[in-house]
Image (cartoon, rainbow, N blue to C red):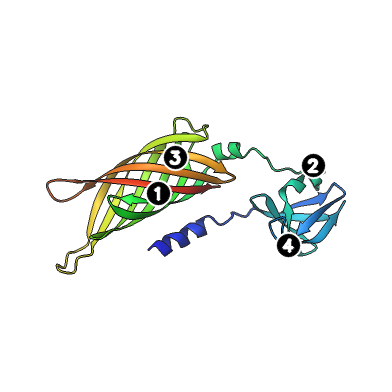
Amino acid sequence: MMRYLLLCFFLITLPLLAEPVAVKVSGDFVNLHSGAGRGYPVLQVALKGEQLSLLTQRTDWVQVEFKQQKYWLARADLAQLMTLQQQTFSLSDDRLAAYEQRSLEAGLLLGDFNGSSLYQLSVAYNFTPYIQTELAIGQANGDQADNLSAELSVYLSPMPHWRISPYFGIGGGVLRTTPRTILVQTQDRNNSLASMELGLRYYLSRNFIARAGYRRSVIVTDRNDNEEIDTWKLGFSVFF
């Protein structure tokens, strides 16, 4: 199950490619590297007036197409380019502003689900900087049973512009419990969940957010008494 969650996370966080942007060199030249890093060799040099296409961005590097070949351009060299309409091409350096205006997030969190190891994959959408909804799928493996959960939550962030931002929320979902006992053939159980969560988000850099949270859940059972579960989790998210 953990491998499946990791695979889903990496698929979700693949770069979202936009349409190529045609630009031309306005400075004397720009160096085009074989990979996204200063350690990669310069394979081509685009001279003033020559045209290339911007394809996608990876941290401080931009993949470009030049003379039907793909290379990597340092983000700082975007200042040496202009659009075909003679407008200076630039990419905003205000990453904190991008964090505040984010709309989609994908996260991977690890933690403790009432004594069991927890792995959780989440996808979230921000309606406003203050309100976020999240769908989370988690797997908790314990000595007595395995638990698979799916929950939909709504979070409120009273101070979304702070680099360290507290949040709280409520949610609900389902919990599937698979006992591990071999002495008695116990059937899997499906129960409803109702939860509340308190936590912190910390904007790291670029598109990364660290996150820590405590979640208190009530498992609604068909018995006379309901169960209460404590969950602690820590991980990170990427935003788009």
Instruction: Give the spatial CA distance, label 1 vs label 4.
Output: 39 Å
Q: Earlier in the sequence, mark 3 or mark 2?
A: 2
Element on which disc 3 rests = strand
Instruction: Give the spatial CA distance, label 3 vs label 1.
Output: 10 Å
Name the residue located 40 percent from the left edge and 39 percent from the top edge: 199
Q: Residue 73 vs residue 1: left or right?
A: right
Residue 132 is tagged as 3
Element on which disc 4 rests = loop
Q: Which residue is the extreme one toward the left?
A: 224
Residues at discs 2 and 1 in contact (Cβ within 8 Å): no
Q: Amino acid at mark 2?
A: Gln
Q: Earlier in the sequence, mark 1 or mark 4?
A: 4
Question: Which is nearer the eye, 70 or 33?
Answer: 33
Element on which disc 1 rests = strand
Q: Amino acid at mark 3?
A: Gln
Q: Earlier in the sequence, mark 2 or mark 4?
A: 4
Instruction: Give the spatial CA distance, label 3 vs label 2.
Output: 36 Å
